[in-house]
Amino acid sequence: MPISATTVSDAGLAQPGSHVLAVPRPIPVVVSRDTALSYLRASIVALVVAHHSAIAYALYIPTIVPHHPIHPWLSGIPIFDSHRVSAFDLFALFNDIFFMSLMFFVSGLFVWPSLARKGSGTFLRDRSLRLGLPFVLCAVLAPLAYYPAYRLGAADPGFAAFCRDWLSLASLGVWPAGPVWFVWVLLLFDAVAAGIHRLASLPIAILARVASGASRRPAAFFAVFMAVSAAAYLPPLVAFGPNRWVAFGPFSLQASRFLLYFVYFLAGVVVGAGGIERGLLARDGRLGRQWPIWVAAALALYLIVAAMAFLPKADAGGASGLAGLLMFAAFVLCCGACGFALLALFRRFANARSRLFDSLSDNAYGIYLVHYGFVLWLQYALLPANFPAIVKAALVFSGALALSWGTTAALRRIPAVARVI
């Protein structure tokens, strides 16, 4: 978002019948735009905007998110309104289960073809420009997004006082950067992939050949994928708990899910390395044809997770005990099933071009980078309004999406900016 900082049109997809993986040196790769994956990526970004827009109006989740003991505006939910409704808890839970994992998977799809085409050095240079530079700029500008949250409870709501508080945090090594945490983690994963490509590409080639059968047997691929995901998720979950974030300066990550995200990214790399047109996401593969099964499975698993999450004392046992094990298993399976369901739906139905979705896709990366400030300021502006929660959430979402979309489109008219976002 997710987000692939390499756009679909820039990624370069391997031609059917080519075997780019066994060759350590870059080879020519035909550049193509996969409409379904491009639109899926754009839709996930829109879902991220919707998630951040709605979370302020959830009934239960904002009350259980830990607040900073001195700076409550540093909560994961900086602003929450007095107008709230439980439907947004269900919406936020649904998003939280899968959409960041799916963003890493989609981002990974285009990594290996880009490495084959550019080589590790050029790939990392391009990634550093396209991911590193926006991350630094967004981190520097992050205080402008958090300022309205600070104003809600500060004794002195002035901007000068806010700057003093922010710099006092910075002196302790804390510099919240908001949702752009995803960008630096993606850059880290890209660097790991580049190292694998340069030093040990054969394992990826072998895995890609094995995974190529997923076009005929997506359920078998899913089963193996879920087993690996479970192995990556359970140990950090037991060690850190489900909600702990660790941070140093602007670099933050969710401790329990870091390895899970890497597994999803690596799975995307493997699928992309084998050729998107031939593996799990093949246009004539079973995944797209079996979309009703995947949607039904995702819905059933989500209902199980939601029931367990909102039962009284559902998290009392953490990851231990039978209840904790069942909750963990349901989460892992639901995360995978929701991702596969969306992949199936977009592969089956999102193959016709649309000018609106083309524009959303072209601007998706920039929308992700800039939307958070618009969301928080709009939520802050609507606090006094006596509107139902669903109306406020709709206003924030539509306003933030339009403003971030328009801002990105305007910035991309500058050639140097367009080369980055």
Image (cartoon, helix red, strand yellow):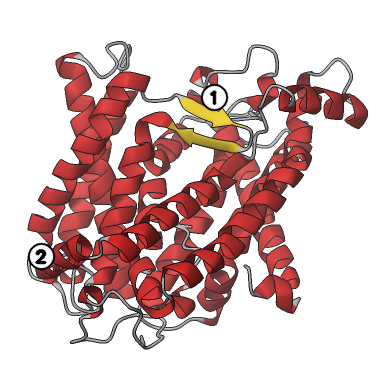
Q: Quadrant of the C terminus?
A: bottom right
Helix, strand or loop at mark 1: helix
Q: Which residue is mark 1?
A: 62
> Of the residues shown, which amino acid type is indicated by label 1?
Pro
* Image quadrant where residue 251 sits: top right
Position of residue 159 measured from the top left corner of the image (x, y, whole percent): 89, 31
Q: Which residue is mark 2?
A: 210
From mark 2 to mark 1, how far is it between C-alphas?
Answer: 44 Å
Could you tell me if residue 395 is visible in this image? no
- Tally of marks: 2
Position of residue 66 measured from the top left corner of the image (x, y, whole percent): 53, 18
Relative to 416, say whether 227 is above or below: above
Position of residue 137 measured from the top left corner of the image (x, y, whole percent): 71, 52
Residue at 37% x, 58% y is 195
> Of the residues shown, which amino acid type is indicated by label 2?
Val
Q: Nearer the viewer, residue 76 or 189?
A: 189
Helix, strand or loop at mark 2: helix
Q: Is residue 224 left or right of residue 98?
A: left
Q: Nearer the viewer, mark 2 or mark 1?
A: 2
Relative to 335, say whether 124 is above or below: below
Q: Are marks 2 and 1 in contact (CB under 8 Å)?
A: no
Q: Nearer the viewer, residue 311 or 371?
A: 371
Position of residue 46 measured from the top left corner of the image (x, y, whole percent): 52, 57
Could you tell me if residue 374 is visible in this image? yes
Residue at 20% x, 75% y is 22
Residue reaching furthest to the front: 199
Question: Is tag 2's residue or tag 1's residue first in the polypeptide sequence?
Answer: 1
